[in-house]
Image: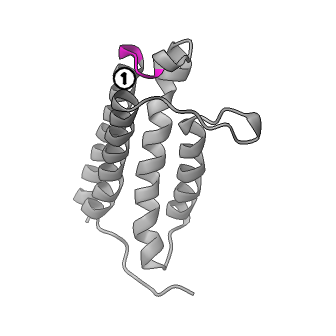
């Protein structure tokens, strides 16, 4: 059983989400643009990083929804939410607004859409931070 700990301050929560969000997005895009697009085919099925992101993001969101007494989980869950969100948001425009080819991964449309979505997520996080900061 975890130990009782005080909830994270709004600034801590904001930073634990937004820093991994942007770090994951920047590292992913640098890899895609500078190294190459690589696909994973477990069982013969193409797995986009949208799916990996969802597998990371959903359990993290559940932990955050119910809270935890475990300090490590209280820190790791928002970080995982940031990482998973970056992976999901990075692929939305690619999958919806392009033919979803390898070249489309590194197209201006895919990159631009990803930047817009990650930026909008950051604005939402900032708004939530400001709302919670005022209550604290």
Where is 77 relative to 55, above or below? below
- Placement of the C terminus among the 4 image quadrants: bottom left
Locate residue 91 relative to residue 13 in the image: left or right: right
Where is 128 relative to 94, above or below? below
According to the image, what is the colour scheme of the structure? one colour
Locate residue 121 relative to residue 51 in the image: left or right: left
Which corner quadrant of the image does residue 48 belong to? top right
Residue visible at 34% across and 42% down in the picture = 27
Q: Can residue 63 be seen by looking at this rendering? A: yes
Q: Nearer the viewer, residue 17 or 111?
A: 111
Residue visible at 70% across and 42% down in the picture = 42
Residue visible at 37% across and 36% down in the picture = 31
Residue visible at 66% across and 32% down in the picture = 46
Magenta residues, start to end: 105-109
Residue 40 lies, in percent from the top left, at 61, 38
Where is 130 relative to 67, above or below? above
Locate residue 39 relative to residue 128 in the image: left or right: right
What secondary structure is found at the residue carrying circle 1? helix
Locate residue 9 relative to residue 67 in the image: left or right: left
Residue 22 lies, in percent from the top left, at 31, 43
Q: Nearer the viewer, residue 133 or 70?
A: 70
- Placement of the N terminus among the 4 image quadrants: bottom right
């Amino acid at each position: 059983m975890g130990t009782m700990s005080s909830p994270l301050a709004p600034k801590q929560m904001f930073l634990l989400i937004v820093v991994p969000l942007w770090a994951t997005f920047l590292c992913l895009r640098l890899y895609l643009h500078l190294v190459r697009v690589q696909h994973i085919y477990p069982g013969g099925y193409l797995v986009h990083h949208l799916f990996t992101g969802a597998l990371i993001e959903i359990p993290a969101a559940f932990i955050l929804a119910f809270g935890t007494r475990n300090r490590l989980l209280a820190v790791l869950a928002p970080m995982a939410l940031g990482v998973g969100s970056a992976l999901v948001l990075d692929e939305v425009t690619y999958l919806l607004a392009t033919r979803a080819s390898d070249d489309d991964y590194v197209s201006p449309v895919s990159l631009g859409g990803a930047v817009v979505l990650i930026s909008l997520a950051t604005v939402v996080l900032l708004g939530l931070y400001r709302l919670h900061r005022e209550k604290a």
